Amino acid sequence: MTREIQGKDQRITSLQNEKVKQVVKLRQRARRDEQGLLIVEDERELQRALKNNRRPASLFYCRDFFAGNNEAAFVSQCRAAGAEVISCAPEVFAKMAYRERPGGILALVPQVKYDLSGLKLPASPLLVVAEAIEKPGNLGTILRSADAAGADAVIVCDRCTDVNNPNVVRASVGAIFTVPVAETSSEETIKWLREKKIQIVAASPHARLAYTQADLRRGTAIVVGEEHQGLSALWMKTADLPVRIPMRGQVDSLNVAAATTILLFEAARQRNAG
């Protein structure tokens, strides 16, 4: 293992460095949970983390992968924020990188965790409840749409994919740092929503009521389900308002992230109009 110093930054040139091994292990969900860290590999996502007081614990960089001058300035910004900043040889950075085309920056950021009791909600909150979403890209897109539509929180029930998966972070474009995300069971969420008097709006292609006919101005939880089977019987039985998105073509359903986006922006439209 060889370490050199470049300016004020430690430099790693060996693939056997323990820090390199730690980053590689964080690709596993168990290791992420054990360390309480997630991997962020894009400047936009890291900017949103910093803006929301999520300081990187460590920042690894390699100038050979930089596309311009912004990356160097961002490294300095993270250093000023108190992150441990480490320069890497190209082969070292390539081993750690999760993305196929590394951008030269990789950070380890403390995981974002909320429970239901920790969510701070306004008088008429807009929530997304995502039940058993399997694909990280879909969960990340749901977070991105929730941020864009002004949702107050996303609740992940009976999780099938890890919220802190690097692909969730990337697909969310950093929204994982801007929208509170809580993880719990469907049963606990239903009980909590009832206590808060928040109506449950369930997306289903079999519902009679079109989503534009539902009143989404009051406290609302938009509930969406797993990609292939949709919402479970528990949620459909509990729903106050099952709604459908009318389909005009031959396809009978939408991707779960696309459906969530449509419902969120209808809620935003109604609330803005009011």
Image (cartoon, grey):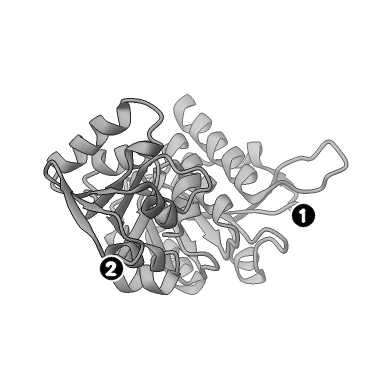
Indicate the position of residue 228 as horizontal and vertical percent values: 72, 61
> Which amino acid type corresponds to the residue marked 1 in the rendered image?
His
Mark 2 = which residue?
18
Q: Quadrant of the C terminus?
A: top left
Taking 147 as reference, is 127 above or below it?
Answer: below
Indicate the position of residue 63 as horizontal and vertical percent values: 33, 37
> Which amino acid type corresponds to the residue marked 2 in the rendered image?
Glu
Among the two numbered marks 1 and 2 on one chain, the one whose residue lies closer to the N terminus:
2
Mark 1 = which residue?
206
Q: Which mark is residue 155?
A: none
Seen at 38% across and 34% down, the residue is 66
Res. 115 visible in picture: no
Characterize the local packing of mark 2: few (<14), some (14-19) or many (20 or more) Cα atoms within 10 angstroms: few
Seen at 13% across and 47% down, the residue is 82
Seen at 29% across and 70% down, the residue is 35
| Quarter where residue 43 is shown | top left
Indicate the position of residue 115 as horizontal and vertical percent values: 33, 65
Using the numbered discs, state the Cα–Cα distance from disc 1 to disc 2 in whole angstroms.
54 Å
| Quarter where residue 32 is shown | bottom left
Indicate the position of residue 77 as horizontal and vertical percent values: 19, 36
How many numbered discs, if any?
Answer: 2
Q: Secondary structure at mark 1?
A: loop
Taking 272 as reference, is 50 above or below it?
Answer: below
Q: Is residue 218 left or right of residue 263?
A: left
Characterize the local packing of mark 1: few (<14), some (14-19) or many (20 or more) Cα atoms within 10 angstroms: few
Q: 48 or 62, which lies in front? A: 62
Q: 165 or 107, which lies in front? A: 107
Q: 127 or 66, which lies in front? A: 66
Q: Secondary structure at mark 2?
A: helix
Nearer the observer: mark 1 or 2; the answer is 2
